[in-house]
């Protein structure tokens, strides 16, 4: 009887089967090295301006002195975090940030969705594209420009208040009344971004099979029924996905907008974490406290981003990794 060992020796060297899947990196590099070379400047900028500054996170745990440097400053542990949470305005900062950020997310998603559904019903192609272009344009304008215009428009003598005062009513102080300031910020952000936010919804709407609408029309379904039973279910994965991913920005209430439009009168309802970090960390040169608050906000934001990815995978079957 022939042993298995002798059979293997007679068969010669064992040939490893070719692995299916990704090719070796050497092959990929030889084929696409020019593409990687084009990415090199962006990679250098990413490492220089985003990765290297992460060393500054350690400022949150020391009593930073610019003259002594990071290594020469005294280590204080979590004292800077405790100092922030003990501040009398810490609760109001969190409340203002959450109110403005959540309001922007909800209003932005709803207005963008309704606008996309309405624009999708328009059949005049030139008019449709003109409206879409006009509503998308404000997204590309800086808040410095938009804020300067809105200060004039929403002032007591601006074009918004002129019809109100003409009726004998008192002028509305949109940017000077603490109770109105957060809702003014939400409204301005929604106006500026709803056209851009509707782009993804419009793309999802164009992916719906037109034959479904034709079949529903033959069966006697009106526009409302077609929207209810075809359009909304067809874009529901996109709605769920965008809603889940927006959770990552729940602590991002819009630093540039608030910084341009806030004033000391509206600090009580308009001051957010980002503006607090700017004032204390840069203007007041309290680098340790500003870094501690920024680090805390970043950690919470990272957790919310991971939660949004998990929810997007569960509810919309969307995976990044």
Image (cartoon, helix red, strand yellow):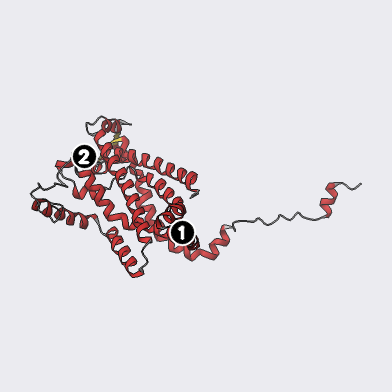
Residue at disc 1, secondary structure: loop
Counting from the top left corner in percent of width and height, residue 22 is at 59, 56
The numbered disc on residue 29 is: none
Distance in Å between CA atoms under marks 2 and 1: 52 Å
Taking the spot 55% from the left edge, 64% from the top edge, the residue there is: 30
The residue sitting at 25% across, 29% down in the picture is: 86
Above or below — where is 128 with respect to 314?
below
Left or right: residue 256 compared with residue 9: left
> Can the viewer see residue 72?
yes
Residue depicted at 36% across the width and 64% down the height: 122
Mark 2 or 1: the one toward you:
1
User: Callout 2 environment at 10 Å: few (<14), some (14 to 19), or many (20+)?
Assistant: many
Residue 116's image quarter?
Answer: bottom left
Residue 319 on image: x %, y %: 49, 49
| In this rendering, position of residue 45 left or right of residue 254 | right
Q: Is residue 64 visible?
A: no
Q: Nearer the viewer, residue 254 or 246?
A: 246
Considering depth in this image, is 42 or 304 the residue closer to the camera?
A: 304
**Circles 2, 1 touching at the beta carbon (< 8 Å):** no
State the residue position of label 1: 220
Foreground of the two, 13 or 46: 46
Pointer 2 residue: 269
């Amino acid at each position: 009887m022939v042993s298995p060992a002798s059979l293997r020796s007679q068969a010669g060297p064992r040939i490893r089967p070719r692995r299916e899947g990704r090719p070796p990196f050497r092959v990929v590099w030889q084929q696409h090295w020019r593409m990687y070379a084009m990415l090199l400047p962006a990679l250098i900028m990413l490492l220089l301006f985003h990765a290297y500054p992460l060393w500054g996170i350690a400022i949150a745990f020391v009593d930073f002195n610019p003259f002594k440097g990071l290594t020469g400053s005294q280590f204080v542990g979590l004292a800077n975090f405790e100092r922030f949470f003990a501040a009398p305005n810490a609760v109001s900062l969190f409340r203002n940030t959450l109110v403005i950020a959540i309001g922007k997310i909800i209003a932005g998603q709803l207005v963008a969705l309704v606008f996309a559904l309405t624009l999708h019903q328009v059949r005049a192609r030139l008019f449709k594209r003109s409206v879409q272009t006009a509503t998308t344009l404000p997204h590309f304008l800086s808040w410095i420009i938009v804020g300067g215009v809105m200060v004039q428009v929403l002032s007591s003598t601006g074009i918004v208040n002129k019809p109100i005062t003409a009726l004998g009513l008192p002028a509305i102080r949109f940017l000077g009344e603490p109770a109105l300031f957060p809702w003014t910020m939400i409204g301005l952000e929604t106006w500026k971004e709803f056209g851009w936010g509707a782009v993804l919804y419009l793309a999802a709407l164009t992916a719906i099979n037109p034959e479904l609408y034709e079949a529903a029309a033959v069966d006697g379904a009106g526009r409302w029924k077609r929207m209810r039973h075809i359009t909304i279910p067809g874009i529901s994965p996109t709605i769920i996905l965008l809603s889940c991913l927006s959770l990552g920005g729940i602590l991002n209430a819009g630093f540039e907008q608030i910084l341009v439009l806030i004033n000391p009168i509206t600090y009580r309802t308009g001051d957010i974490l980002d503006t607090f970090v700017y004032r204390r960390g840069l203007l007041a040169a309290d680098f340790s406290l500003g870094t501690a608050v920024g680090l805390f906000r970043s950690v919470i934001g990272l957790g919310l981003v991971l939660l949004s990815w998990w929810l997007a995978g569960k509810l919309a079957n969307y995976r990044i990794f």
